[in-house]
């Protein structure tokens, strides 16, 4: 493919793809990797600075790929709503609708606005999707997926899609800017020296146009600084630093301290001790279960973590019973476990009891107080990193909701994929009991009374 152009033969002649778009010098290695010699390269990761043209580049890359192999291609944003705003309705710097530039009418068969889907004349399908509803697309067999803004997306979407692409020989591409030491950093560290991946990180010092002019000039960064952007944020956005946490995140400082103090590491299961569980229950959302043991100081050691979605309660009970742990009863869940299920007429507590699995509920305190309790808990607990990386990822990514009108963060948390893991940790932080001198858990009478009263109300 000379100079990254693919000739598409149409009834009225030939059309070149990319259509009225040219890769910048720093984008060309990605196109070379994916297409020179055929569409036989399977994995690519690009950590590029703000305004490096990530989505525009990969939108055009997807258009070329759609003509080289017939199949379905997904351009995946963290949420479906964001996908519509950024990609489907997006306008480029020349005032063109992005999808019209990348997929000219000459190669289209149809366009479905409600599903954000374009069917192409050669039989391929290109569609905008969100990682917040990836499992609703069950039955689809994509041959290529672009994970845009992956560092703020649900990482379990990749776990879901990976076996599909492995089976059909499909390709995956990840494009994002750092957002702290979460799954984005972990994927970059895992791929940067892997010969089977195209993996690169580009700061503003690495990106130039055809004339050798920097894409982002120093005065552009100075404008951001003068408008109030912090030095940490500038380092993250323009120098691709992993050190700045997720903007608006609740627990960045505490998690960095835990890492510095060596409390995130190798803390395996002790077969001589019982284990406790702490649940956040969901169905369409994830259900998250934290598994702990008490350390010698009585503080929690988080040894394991279970998370899944669209599964009933008995699935998680079987999952826990399959593990080589002995359980301390009761298991602990949120207050809404005492609500009645309209399908069975029973509460989740009663349903679990029918399976000989005993639950109590953690005191239902205001969320802000629970977040404070979680901050305090992160300062003293230990994390068995090898088995709880997904929990750590959720805690690192748990953030405040953004108020777009006032241009500031609210005090309330933003509900996304990270919420369930963070909520289960919050319940653990509220409900945890240290060992007393007798070797039995210390009981806070006031808290214990409230817990028991909530359980009685569920019966």
Image (cartoon, rainbow, N blue to C red):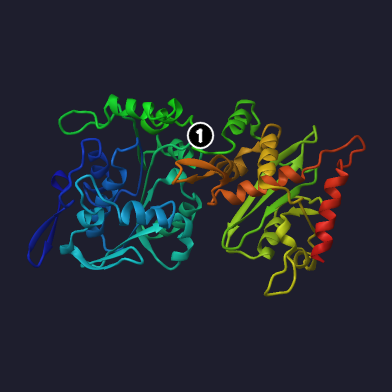
x, y (%) of residue 377? 70, 37
Quadrant placement of the C terminus: bottom right
Q: Is residue 249 left or right of residue 459?
A: left
> Which residue is found at the position 66% from the left and 31% from the top?
263
Q: Is residue 302 above or below residue 75?
A: above
Q: 108 or 375: which is nearer to us?
A: 375
- Which residue is situated farthest in the left direction here? 13
Q: 41 or 453: which is nearer to us?
A: 453
Name the image quarter holding residue 143: bottom left
Name the image quarter holding residue 315: bottom right
Q: Is residue 88 above or below residue 397?
A: below
Circle 1 Cα neighbour tier, 10 Å, few/some/many (<14 / 14–19 / ≥20): many
Q: 283 or 447: which is nearer to us?
A: 447
x, y (%) of residue 80? 42, 57
> Which residue is found at the position 39% from the left and 64% from the top?
141
The secondary structure type at the circle numbered 1 is loop
- Which residue is situated farthest in the front direction here? 406
Q: Is residue 24 above or below residue 90?
A: above
Q: Is residue 269 visible?
A: yes
x, y (%) of residue 405? 44, 46
> Which residue is found at the position 44% from the left and 51% from the top?
78
Q: Is residue 251 left or right of residue 432?
A: left
Q: Is residue 432 left or right of residue 35?
A: right
Name the image quarter holding residue 240: top left
> Which residue is found at the position 31% from the left and 57% from the top?
88
Residue that numbered label 1 is attached to = 245
Q: Is residue 145 visible?
A: no
x, y (%) of residue 74? 35, 58
Q: Is residue 355 above or below residue 40?
A: below
């Amino acid at each position: 493919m000379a100079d990254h152009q693919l000739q598409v033969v149409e009834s009225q002649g030939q059309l070149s793809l990319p259509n009225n778009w040219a890769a910048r010098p720093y984008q060309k290695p990605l196109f070379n990797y994916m297409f020179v010699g055929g569409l036989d390269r399977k994995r690519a990761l690009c950590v590029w600075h703000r305004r490096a043209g990530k989505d525009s580049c990969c939108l055009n890359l997807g258009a070329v790929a759609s003509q080289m192999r017939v199949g379905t291609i997904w351009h995946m944003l963290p949420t479906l709503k964001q996908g519509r705003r950024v990609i489907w309705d997006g306008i480029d710097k020349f005032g063109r609708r992005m999808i019209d530039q990348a997929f000219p009418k000459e190669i289209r068969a149809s366009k479905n606005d409600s599903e954000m889907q374009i069917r192409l004349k050669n039989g391929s399908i290109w569609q905008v999707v969100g990682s917040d509803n990836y499992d609703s697309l069950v039955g689809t067999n994509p041959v290529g997926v672009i994970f845009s803004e992956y560092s703020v997306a649900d990482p379990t979407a990749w776990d879901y899609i990976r076996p599909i692409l492995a089976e059909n020989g499909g390709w995956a591409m990840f494009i994002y800017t750092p957002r702290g030491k979460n799954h984005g950093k972990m994927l970059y560290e895992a791929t940067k020296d892997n010969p089977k991946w195209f993996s690169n990180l580009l700061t503003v010092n690495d990106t130039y146009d055809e004339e050798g002019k920097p894409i982002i000039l120093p005065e552009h960064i100075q404008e951001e600084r003068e408008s109030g952007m912090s030095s940490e944020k500038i380092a993250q956005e323009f120098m691709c630093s992993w050190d700045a946490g997720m903007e608006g995140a609740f627990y960045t400082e505490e998690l960095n301290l835990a890492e510095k103090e060596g409390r995130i590491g190798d803390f395996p299961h002790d077969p001589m001790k019982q284990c406790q569980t702490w649940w956040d229950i969901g169905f369409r959302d994830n259900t998250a279960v934290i598994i702990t043991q008490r350390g010698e100081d009585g503080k929690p050691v988080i040894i394991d973590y279970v998370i899944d979605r669209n599964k009933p309660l008995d699935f998680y009970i079987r999952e826990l019973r399959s593990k080589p742990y002995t359980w301390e009863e009761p298991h602990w869940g949120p207050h809404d476990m005492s609500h009645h299920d309209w399908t069975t007429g029973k509460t989740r507590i009663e349903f679990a009891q029918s399976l000989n699995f005993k639950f109590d509920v953690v005191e239902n305190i205001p969320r802000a107080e629970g977040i404070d309790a979680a901050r305090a808990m992160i300062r003293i607990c230990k994390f068995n990193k090898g088995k709880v990386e997904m929990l750590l990822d959720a805690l690192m990514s748990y953030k405040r909701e953004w108020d777009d009108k006032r241009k500031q963060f609210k005090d309330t948390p933003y509900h996304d994929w990270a919420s369930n893991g963070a909520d289960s940790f919050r319940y653990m932080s509220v409900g945890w009991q240290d060992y007393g001198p007798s070797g039995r858990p210390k009981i806070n009478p006031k808290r214990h009374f409230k817990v028991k009263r909530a359980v009685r109300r569920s019966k």
